[in-house]
Amino acid sequence: MSGAPEPLSREPGGAGGRPDPADPDDPAAAGDHSERVDQLHARVRWLDRYRRIVAIAAAAIIAPVLIGRVAEMLGAGWPQIHATMLSILLGVIVWWVIEIGLIYLTALWETEHDGLVRDRSLPRAVLRRWRRWPRLR
C-alpha cells in the first residue's frame, strides 16, 4: 500500500467501498444519514456525561509532567510555598484547557448532528429596497 488516497470511482461502491456521493441510487446521497446521526448522538451523549471525568483524568496525567518542568525552571531559589501554589495553578489551567477542548469537540459534533437532522430548505431570500424618509426642512 503506497499511502496515496484512492481515486473516486464511478462504481456503485465508490472508492474503498465508500458510496459515491454523485450516485443518485445511493440512499446516503439522498439524505439518509441515520447511521451518522446515531453515531453523533451517542458521542455527544457520552462526552456530555463523562467530559469532566475525562478532563480531570487527562489533567492529572499531564500536569505532573508540566509541574516537573516548571520546578526545573524555577530552581532551588524559589520558596516552596510559591512553587506549590504555582504548580496548583498550572494544574488547574491544564484542566481548564482540556475541558475547553472537549467542549469544542462536543460543539462540533452537535453542529454536525443538527445539520444532518434539520431540514436544509431555507425560505427564498427577498431583497427589499428601503425608501428614504422625506427630509424635514
Image (cartoon, rainbow, N blue to C red):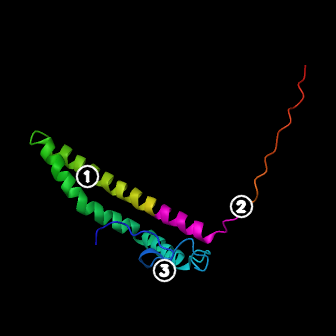
Left or right: 101, with 75 as reference point: right
Residue at the location (37% across, 67% down)?
5
State the SS at label 3: loop
Query: Measured along the vertical axis of the image, is residue 33 above or below residue 57?
Result: below
Crowd rating for badge 2 (residues with CA inside 10 Å; few <14, some 14–19, many 20+): few
Left or right: 126, with 37 as reference point: right
Q: Is residue 121 magenta?
A: yes
State the SS at label 2: loop
Crowd rating for badge 3 (residues with CA inside 10 Å; few <14, some 14–19, many 20+): some
Give the residue type at disc 2. Leu
Tally of marks: 3
Q: Which residue has dot 1 on it?
A: 88
Q: CA distance from mark 1 to mark 3?
A: 54 Å
Crowd rating for badge 1 (residues with CA inside 10 Å; few <14, some 14–19, many 20+): some
Q: CA distance from mark 2 to mark 1?
A: 50 Å
Q: Which residue has dot 2 on it?
A: 122
Is the Cβ of the residue at disc 2 closer than 8 Å to that at disc 1? no
Q: Which residue has dot 3 on it?
A: 13
Q: CA distance from mark 2 to mark 3?
A: 32 Å
Give the mark toward the camera: 1 or 3: 3
Label drawn at residue 101? none
Residue at the location (90% across, 23% down)?
136
Give the mark toward the camera: 2 or 1: 2
Give the residue type at disc 1. Ile
- The range drawn in magenta is 106-122
State the SS at label 1: helix
Of 58 and 117, nearer the camera is: 117
Mark closer to the chain start, 2 or 3 = 3
Residue at the location (24% across, 63% down)?
61
